[in-house]
Image (cartoon, helix red, strand yellow):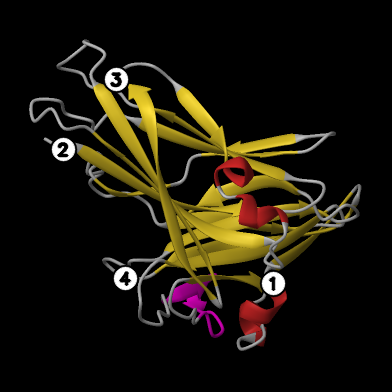
Amino acid sequence: MSTSVKWLGFGIASALTRTAAHFYPSSGNVTAPYPVSCRLTIFAEGQAPTGLTVDGLRLSQPEGVWVDEAFPVLKSSSAALFGMEVCISCQQQRVDLENSSCVLEFASLVSSVRFWPVCTEGGPEIVGRSRVAPLIKDPFHLTSVIVINPTDQPQQPKLLLNGKPAGNSEVGAFALKEFELDSLAASQPDGQLAPQEVGFGLFRGGSLEFAGDRTPCAIYLVYRDVLTKRPVSVVSI
């Protein structure tokens, strides 16, 4: 039983793209609209973590917030990417929030991309969860890996590209870093993605795996449009 649930994700702050956090506090054993609070914390390399609490939430009622309205500093920040921790909690001890959910959204005038952030605390324990995600590289997308470190110590999760150790993935304290796919593969030229000629050009495929039991970091694969650089898909590992 958990009276709080925590997720770790990231957001984008730019003139063209805004980030929204949607959350749904839910309990399978209670339906009364008990008060629920949501703690949002943002951070980036060179910037100390900043947090605030969103009050007025109710159990079993969906809610959301524009992150740059909650943190106006993002509108003038030089960091295009920022890490974000979302924590939902309830003071009623008999309320189990394990089934609550959170969705992050990147919204622009021409597109919207939504994804489920990694649950780091209080969620259901998934036995045998796969920590492998498919990788693709084609003429239409830019592929990268984002590693988010919410701790006060540098972290370097062990990543495997096609089953072989990838390049340096170290991230500093309270920071996140985006690694281009080619930079991760540079240290293992024999482990490059397998090429295949298709009708629209050269297609490469492979896999990225997190090798290890636990890590405080969250790891995401991001696919961007090759022309606009806007994200079109986000996948957690």
Q: Is residue 28 above or below residue 103?
A: above
Q: Amino acid at mark 1?
A: Glu
Q: Quadrant of the N terminus?
A: top left
Eye-nearest disc, 4 or 1: 1
On residue 180, which mark appears?
A: 1
Q: CA distance from mark 3 to mark 2?
A: 14 Å
Q: CA distance from mark 2 to mark 4?
A: 25 Å
Q: Amino acid at mark 4?
A: Gly
SS type, badge 2 = loop
In the image shown, does 123 or 74 lie closer to the viewer? Answer: 74
Q: Mark 1 packing: few (<14 Cα in 10 Å), some, or many (20+)? A: some
Mark 3 lies on residue: 59
Mark 2 lies on residue: 2
SS type, badge 4 = loop
SS type, badge 3 = loop
Q: Is residue 114 above or below residue 27?
A: below
Dot 2 or dot 1, earlier in sequence = 2
